[in-house]
Structure formats: structure tokens, C-alpha cells
Amino acid sequence: MEPLHARYPFLARSRDAVEAAAVDLGEIVATDETVTARALERVESAITDGTIGEPHRRTRVELLSYPVARVLVSLVDVHICTRKYAQAEAEAAYDRFTAEFETTTELKSTQRETLDRTELLAEFDLASAVRETGDRYHVEVGAYLDLAADQRGDSWRLVNRPLTDGEVRVTAEELNVLLKQAIRHRVTDGLPFNVPDAIADELTEEVDRLEEVLSELELTREIDTVVPELFPPCMKSLLDQVQKGEHLEHHSRFAIATFLVGIGMTTDEIVDLFQVNPGFGEEATRYQVDHIRGDTSPTEYSTPACSTMQSYGDCVNMDDLCEAISHPMGYYEQKLDDTDEEELVDWREDEGDEEADA
């Protein structure tokens, strides 16, 4: 296990180093409190301040804390936690590799192994997709679209980029941002995963701590915009069934109700929406929605993750964004981010305008 592995634990060679050391993750979480504490710090810091905390001075502890942190994120299994953790890991890596790119000669003189841009491009199979010409880089349009999809700002839109022979021209700084996105994808990939009970049992206190931190913070951005055409396919389907008066199973009603609460709809608005549904009872529906909202219960329920939607058969009509997003709320947030504000017409405002016209 080398310092480079600890600085960039998402690299294939870092994973190989852990495997070569024949590390037993179950034994680590049961016996090595230092690794577990550092793993907890990685995730908690990601939630609270968008960092992964200060690296541990011991290479082994720092490196092994990464897979344990991924276990903790999987056990918590909350979309916001997963998203903030992956972003924090990517930001930390970005700070490190940009510094190394700029000071490679000085660092090598100290015999410290560093990472250069060529190696990082190869790590994500981007070597053949990126071409350098002077102080500019040219990225194949397919790779660019994949890595720039989550970037905010009109400057990242393909229509606003120089495009020649299927390549998009970017600066070195912009290429670094795209590499950061590739790292975020790598960290997010596979999260959350199933954790063996023996390992989960050893991490009960750490998971409780993270859930406490999550409960104390307002992590989701304040969404108060209802634009059905931007809903994820699963929610579009459930909403369509509601509007057609079709019977919904309990898990399906729960999913669409939590989603509508999450995007800012009031209890009255949701009750009105469900009136056409078979077996509708206003009092029962209102109680259920208030219960989900946390008004009549100690818990504010969140929308089920994509994996849960799949297990219940509610995941339908998947599109390309579904493949890159692990939660319906994340899908909707991304769609809102990608749409010009002047094009966002809130469903409730539109209905109000129609009533006024009538």
C-alpha cells in the first residue's frame, strides 16, 4: 500500500493493492477502530461540509477507510448521503491531482509518486477520447456529453461549444473538471450495495451517528416546482395511473405521495389529485400524506430509491438519465437544473391560469 493509493483510493491499482494485501473487511470493522473512525469521518464530513476530512497520517488507515466509508454509505442508503459523499471524494481528488499536475517536477524530486493527466485519462478509458494540441484539448463528443451532463452553466452546453469533426474543444482547466466528474461517477458506481449482516452489525453505532447527522441537517435543496414533464419515468407512470383513476398498490401510492411531498406539493394539492382514485377517502388520504410529511409522525419519509422502485416493479420506461441516477429525486433535480428557468412552468400555476381564463 503506497501513499498514492491512499490519495486516490478509487484507482484500479489502489483496489489491487488492497486485494493483494488480502484484507478482510469484516475483520477490519470488527478490530480496527482507527480505520472505522476515519471512514466515519469521511462520510460525516461529506454530509456536513462537503469534504472528506483530513487524511490520516498512516497510509494503511487512509486507504482502508475508503472501502469502509462506502460500506457506511450503503448501510445509510439515503440518496443525499450518497450524492454528497461521492461529490466530496471527487472534490478531494480534484484538489490533489490539479496540484500535482502543476508541481509534478518538484514533487518527483522528493521521490513522491505522483499522478499525471495521461495516467488519469487512461484510468477512465479516456486516453483515446482526448487529444492535446498546444494549450487546448479536444474531447470526443460522446465522452464530453457523458462527463459534462451534470455541469451547471450555459458554457457547458454542447450548442455553445466549439465542435469540429466530432470533437469538443476544452481548456486544461475544463478537462480537469471533466476528470473530476469521471471520478464522481467511479465513486458513485455500485452504491449502495448489499452489506453482509456480520459487517453491518459491527457498524451499527457509526450508521446511527450518520443518520442522526442527516436528521439534523436540511440537505435537500428546497424544491417547490411541479413540472410533470420533467418527472422521472416511474413517477410519470404513477401519476398517469392516478389521473386515470386506476388502482395503485400501497407501495406505489407511497412512492408517488412521497415524491409529490418532496417536490413541494401541499397536502391539499395531493389530496385533490387523488380524489379520482378508486377507494379514495379524503380523511384517510390526508392522514397518510401528513404522516409521510412528518406532521403526524416522528419521521419525515423520503421517496424510495431506484433500487426499491425496481424491487416493487414500479421502475418503468427507463431512459439514459435513469442509468446514471440512483434516485427519483436526483433525476428530477437534474432535469430542473438542465432546463432554463423561463421554460419552467409550474403545473399549479398553469392550472390557476386556466381557471382564471375560464
Image: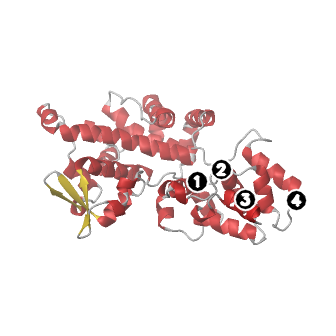
Q: Earlier in the sequence, mark 2 or mark 3?
A: 2
Q: Amino acid at mark 4?
A: Gly
Q: Amino acid at mark 2?
A: Gly
For discs 3 and 1, the disc positioned in front in the rendered view? 3
Assess whether mark 1 and mark 2 are in contact (beta carbons under 8 angstroms). yes
Q: Earlier in the sequence, mark 2 or mark 4?
A: 2
Q: Which residue is mark 2?
A: 262
Work out how far the residue at label 4 is from the one at label 3, CA to CA, in angstroms: 25 Å
Q: Could you say whether the residue bearing mark 2 is in a helix, strand or loop? A: helix
Q: Earlier in the sequence, mark 3 or mark 1?
A: 1
Q: Could you say whether the residue bearing mark 3 is in a helix, strand or loop? A: helix
Q: At 72% across and 41% down in the image, what residue appears?
A: 299
Residue 202: x percent and y percent? 55, 37
Could one spot residue 1 in this view of the protein?
A: no
Q: Which residue is mark 4?
A: 281
Q: Earlier in the sequence, mark 2 or mark 1?
A: 2
Work out how far the residue at label 4 is from the one at label 1, CA to CA, in angstroms: 27 Å
Q: Which residue is mark 3?
A: 352
Residue nearer the viewer, 219 or 151 = 151
Characterize the local packing of mark 3: few (<14), some (14-19) or many (20 or more) Cα atoms within 10 angstroms. few
Residue 67: x percent and y percent? 42, 43
Q: At 86% across and 54% down in the image, what residue appears?
A: 284
Characterize the local packing of mark 2: few (<14), some (14-19) or many (20 or more) Cα atoms within 10 angstroms. many
Q: Which residue is mark 1?
A: 329
Work out how far the residue at label 2 is from the one at label 3, CA to CA, in angstroms: 21 Å
For discs 4 and 3, the disc positioned in front in the rendered view? 3
Q: Which mark is residue 24?
A: none
For discs 2 and 3, the disc positioned in front in the rendered view? 3
Vertical arrangement, residue 189 with respect to residue 61, above or below: below
Q: Could you say whether the residue bearing mark 1 is in a helix, strand or loop? A: helix
Q: Earlier in the sequence, mark 4 or mark 1?
A: 4
Q: Earlier in the sequence, mark 4 or mark 3?
A: 4
